[in-house]
Image: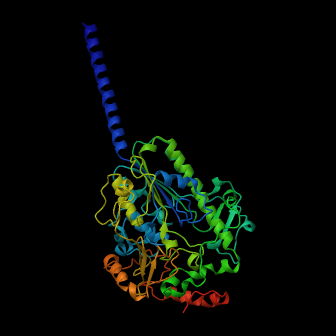
Amino acid sequence: MNWLKSKIMIARAVKIKLFLIIFIIGLYTTSHAQNKEKPNILMLCIDDMNDWVGFLGGHPQAKTPNMDKLANRGVNFTKAYCTAPGCSPSRNALLFGIEPHNSGLYPFYDINEIESEVLEPYTALPLLFRQNGYKTVGLGKVFHNPDNRYKQDEIWDEYKMYANSKLNLLKDKGYYPEPYNKRLVSCPANNPATDFKDRKSADHAIRFLEKKHNKPFFLAVGFILPHTPFITPEENYDRFNLPIFEPAIRADDLVDIPLTGRSNAQIYVELPLRRDNAWEKVRRGYLASISFTDDNVGLVLDALEKSIYADNTIVVLWSDHGFHLGEKRTFSKFSLWEEATRTPFIILDPRKKEGHGEVCEQTVGLINVYKTISDLANIETPDYVDGMSLAPWLVSPNKQLDRPAMTTWGRGNYSLRTKKWRYTRYFDGSEELYDVIKDSNEWTNLANKAEYKELMQQLADKWLPKNEAPQVKSGRKLYNVVDADSPTRALKIFKNKSNEFKLLNLKPALD
């Protein structure tokens, strides 16, 4: 009898154990299936990179094989434009999903110091994903520095900002200006690549992709180069032999440009480069910086390709804005011209086949990133979010998009980019108009010609903001724009440089 009871008890224990095993397997299978349905996101955020990349053809000596490969696999948006030509306002617009004229976030900010009620209505893109079951990881420059500290524990499960190790600069091999100006430094260092902060971020991303994760992830990797100063490993600098091809520049390019436009572009920054005959060294440093970023992008993409996540990870690559390397007589961003507003933008969704490997030539704004990534992950966006989803253009890149991309630089200064036109109106009513099909360098401003008045009015009436949010004052840091809120301060700085221009026989039409 005891033997029979013992046998029954053993049988029950086996049944319970089998039930638990089946239950656990079921939970794991369900969880795994759910994670497979939710795509991972790898967002590659690059600083100050213009079209000097192979996949956009902006410079004949560009060497970007890894980004070129990504462009050939995904959809390459060749006419993509930033929301603002400065790191802080561009990234705030992209990561909060709101145009500056709706948020009031026009200039540069430390968003940690903005009054809390100002940002309370907005949900940062990585936070939206975290709220929807994603593990969020941020590496390097995602928000504008030092904005990366913004709600770090709330937004990120994991975040790391790296610094360079002590770099041994080869000053004589590049350009190291006297008097010292960090913004203009362009030279290699003979340190190993692993001493550079961007490589440290890439290596961290690689380690993350090598691990198993029980949740879908949103991984944002921010690379700071080619932001100034242009300091790279010597190997990258040596990839570019002299002479370095000079972009198209016209000496009298600025004679037909409104004073506000010339002032915002900070044309005087090029003076030391012209004085020291350093343009070639600086352009070499910029190409080397892009090359180093391409190396790091390649390492991360290779790690993804080797990982278990390759078939279910959407890759999005963007730069916050472009950069001038002498075009329009400037070394800067901060303008509403093509070089500062056009940016690289690639999306690869490995779950889709149609459209991939193609080019999308429709004009699109980076304001659309927020809705596009959310749409691809089947996540509903907050009601306030501006822009639209570009998911249909991943399937049909040639699909028509009948709306311009708009770039804002200060309250009242807006530029519209269509396939054929760039129309810019400044806060004081001054205007620029370029036929970018016939005049890709934007050398001839048509705004003063009577036959174009109706066209400009139509563009303004249909697409320029009807209402502008007041500028957010709290947290404001760098405010280097001539706009409706500061119509004279930056102009004074610009005019004070006029004598230096004249001494160098430059002709920027200062008066």
Q: How many badges with numbers are in the image?
A: 0
Q: Nearer the viewer, residue 141 or 40?
A: 40
Return the residue nearer the eye: 452 or 81: 452
Q: Is residue 161 left or right of residue 400?
A: right
Instruction: Using residue 123 as the reference point, say whether residue 270 is left or right of it.
Output: right
| Residue drawn at the location 51% of the way across and 41% of the way down | 306
* Percent x, y of residue 32: 36, 39
Tell me if residue 419 comes above or below residue 36 in the rendering.
below
* Direction from residue 256 to residue 173 in the image, left or right: right
Q: Nearer the viewer, residue 24 or 78?
A: 78
Residue 250 visible? yes
Q: Locate the N terminus by quadrant.
A: top left
Q: Residue at x 34, y 75 (%)?
A: 463
- Image coordinates of residue 480 in percent, x first then y, are 50, 80
Residue farthest to the right, as pictured: 172
Task: Please say if 309 is above or below 52.
Answer: above
Q: Position of residue 42 (x, y in %)?
A: 45, 52
Location of residue 497 (image quadrant): bottom right
